[in-house]
Image (tube, rainbow, N blue to C red):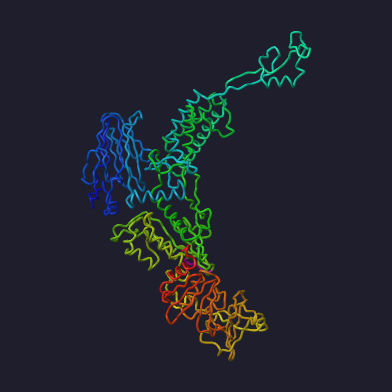
Amino acid sequence: MMALLPSGSLKEKELVVIETGDLTCIIKGKAEHPKYNKLHQHMPFKVEDAMQFQCRANGEVKIEVYDVLTQQLVPYEEQDFLPIFFENGRYEIIIIPNNKESLIFYHEYPEFREAIGQISRGNILTGTLHFQNEVGLTSFEVRDEKNNALVEVMLEIYPTKLDYKKDYKALLDEVNEEVYNLAYHFIKRTYLQASAKIYKEPSLAEFYRLVDRHYKQYIRAIDQVEKTSHHQLIKTYKEVRGNCLRRQDQKSLNYLRKNADKFIDISNGFAIDGRNILPIKGLLIKKEHTMDTHENRYVKWTMLRIGARLKNLKEIVSTSNKWGNNKEDNELMQRLDKMIEQVEKRQKRPFWRKVGKLDRSVMNMVLQMAPGYREVLQVYTIVSKSLVLQGSIYKMSIKDIATLYEYWTFLKLGQILARKCTQISQDIVKVNRDGLFVNLDKSKRAERKYIHPVTGERITLRFQYDTSTANNRVPTVQQKPDSMLSISKNGKSHEYQYIFDAKYRLDLETDRTPGPMQEDINTMHRYRDSIVVNTGERYERTAFGAYVLFPWREWEEYQIHRLYQSIDQVNIGGLPFLPNATELVERFIDNLLNKSAEQLQQEGILPKGTEVSENNLYSTDYVMICRVNKMNNLMILKERQYSIPLDSLDSSWQKINYISLLEEGTGQIIVYARVVQMKIEGENLLFTLAEENKTSIICNEYLVNNHAMFYSNSFLYAKHLTDFYKKTREEEILWRLLNRISNEVKIELDSLYVDKAKKILAYRFKNYDLEIDRDARNFYFSGPGFRERFNLDLVVDNETYVFKRLAECIYPETI
């Protein structure tokens, strides 16, 4: 077990020196990375975490590798080394020939091939390789003028912001587990080692890696099939003259039996029933060998399939280069052209032209055991498989780590929601498989939908939420955050939106504990302020919070960071998020799901001048419920006027915004109307009303003595007359919590007249009761097999906790 040095010189040094009889190859760069050092300063370095390095050369070779512990070059004897190559690093390559022969630098990534070239004088090759956000293995070759490899080198590029062996591999596994081959790219600067496995339909990128490795073996097998092909001996029948006939089989004899007119009487014929006869015509049996067997048809079919896939691959590579403004990789195109040419040339050979089309499935001992055939079957089976990032046979390029982190955050947020809610979307993730590799579909369809198991509230997680679409269009500049979490709340027509934006960056300088970059936090402010919706009258902000998700593991110590504490203050900040560090994000999402609409509204940052009452979360307008007989009810609705003695009203009458009529004998409030004008006429107050609106508020056995005033917002969402009765903040919150759990909550009062009641006796729904003991400052929640006591002060102090505890009592297996 080795410990990392706390710091070191960041000057460029010789990291690898390779000397052979043909050349000297030097790799220079910074041996240490400050972010990597800070990430691992408290972590012991284990042997299994050692950097991978390989070098193969013709003849004798001398290799020296920079040792971080001793800070000098040491002879390489396959010992373990600390990482010396990192993402976003720039490394200079210097290749000096030992003779006058020109050398060629080869890397499968075209831009790297072009980055290393000859200096103006001499045959020295030099240039710089920039690895950007790509990690894993990278290989290059130094070739002679005849394109023969003189030296092959493999290096390992390490990430600087997360643990390579734990976080990075876990991130890859989780991405591929959710959407197979989403992590793969075509040809990049680096790759990981993989093995073939029957999984799902492979992408063209996977097909290329497989066929590139096995194509020579496949062509050799085709040629061997031609030389030692399996054939069949078949019989053919031809009608000939009778004197040409030879020994007959059952088929030819049946032909003669059915054609008696073919026989003639002749003196030297066969004696049958007193006649001497011979046939004048019959079937001549011929036996010949044919190559048109089911096994050969299968081999020809594989050539057609592989050839078509290679053409498709070439077309997409060419198109992607054309429209992606990338230079065409001539070496890759030549390799594809050569493969296509070889397979098409064999199809045109006389041997294969005589072989027909495959019309049935074939799997017999010839394909499995015969030389040539078994190799064709083996290779075609392999190139039809997909790749998993385990093993060491194939090279598979991976998307850059920033893109991977973006994909992983969206998929992981979906997994967290799936554990807490019921997933209702069947087509959960849209992917684009039209090109060389798989990408998440960034259209508006790339979303997941859930429903809260207790409240029934709907939750939507959208990938690449685009404000340029028709439904989301903003009047200024397009915004496109990575993930948008939209939560609906019962009783509210709008959604509460929360932005989660993945940023693969770390700020190691501003605070003692690493956190998100300050410019990324500024982006969150921009997102929240610019994402708005047109309500018809004005634009309103819909995003209540915005958070940077960044790669950091130590979530416990991060809780003292100012950009974590800012979430409680202004609903903008950063959250560490890695496969082994999801606690803070899970906790945060849990709170969003279980908080009420009023709590979320309170936490939002409102414009200055907006008034929010602490004691009443509803509007300050009132609705007045008036008890009338049927005749007066019809007259009021017809004339749109209602009069009431002014001295029967309290001082709040000026805030009456609606009039609702409770018709005697119906037991139900069915209409309400907005007040257009109020006018004092003598001792009465006259209301002029707008057109009535339909409603359905059940009174049960409760009534209004004459008239009663309630908050209008409470009226608009009420189902029972007793729902209006809330004397204290605790009663209001309890009613709201229970209505999130059930839509059948009924309030029991100490009077049948709502306007004369003094207190609530209980809340009841289904088989559950909630009773309040005001003297002891407790309330009791009871149901089948349980009775729980709660402190009444918790209702105001920690509404979310009370909601979760009540839900756990009812749905113990869900919460």
Residue positioned 27% across, 42% down in the render? 80
Name above or below for residue 748 compared with residue 583.
Answer: below
Q: Which of these two is toward me, 604 or 804?
A: 804
Q: Which of these two is toward me, 229 or 345?
A: 229
**Residue 611 visible to an observer of this rendering:** no
Query: Quarter-wise, where is residue 574 in the image?
Result: bottom left
**Residue 720 visible to an observer of this rendering:** yes
Relative to 198, 573 lies left or right:
left
Relative to 15, 462 lies left or right:
right
Q: Residue furthest right?
A: 274
- Point out residue 210 in the picture as x, y percentages from the top left corner: 44, 37
Relative to 11, 144 lies left or right:
right
- Point out residue 793 in the picture as x, y percentages from the top left corner: 41, 76
Residue positioned 74% across, 22% down in the render? 258
Relative to 570, 624 lies left or right:
right
Residue positioned 28% across, 48% down in the render? 46
Residue positioned 33% across, 30% down in the render? 144
Q: Find out whether residue 582 is within the magenta segment.
A: no
Q: Residue furthest top?
A: 267
- Point out residue 91 in the picture as x, y percentages from the top left corner: 30, 43
Name above or below for residue 571 compared with residue 170.
Answer: below
Name above or below for residue 444 compared with residue 397.
Answer: below
Majority secondary structure of magenta residues: strand
Query: Quarter-wise, where is residue 692 in the image?
Result: bottom right
- Point out residue 287 in the picture as x, y percentages from the top left corner: 61, 19
Q: Find out whether residue 540 is within the magenta segment.
A: yes
Magenta stretch in the rendered image: 537-541
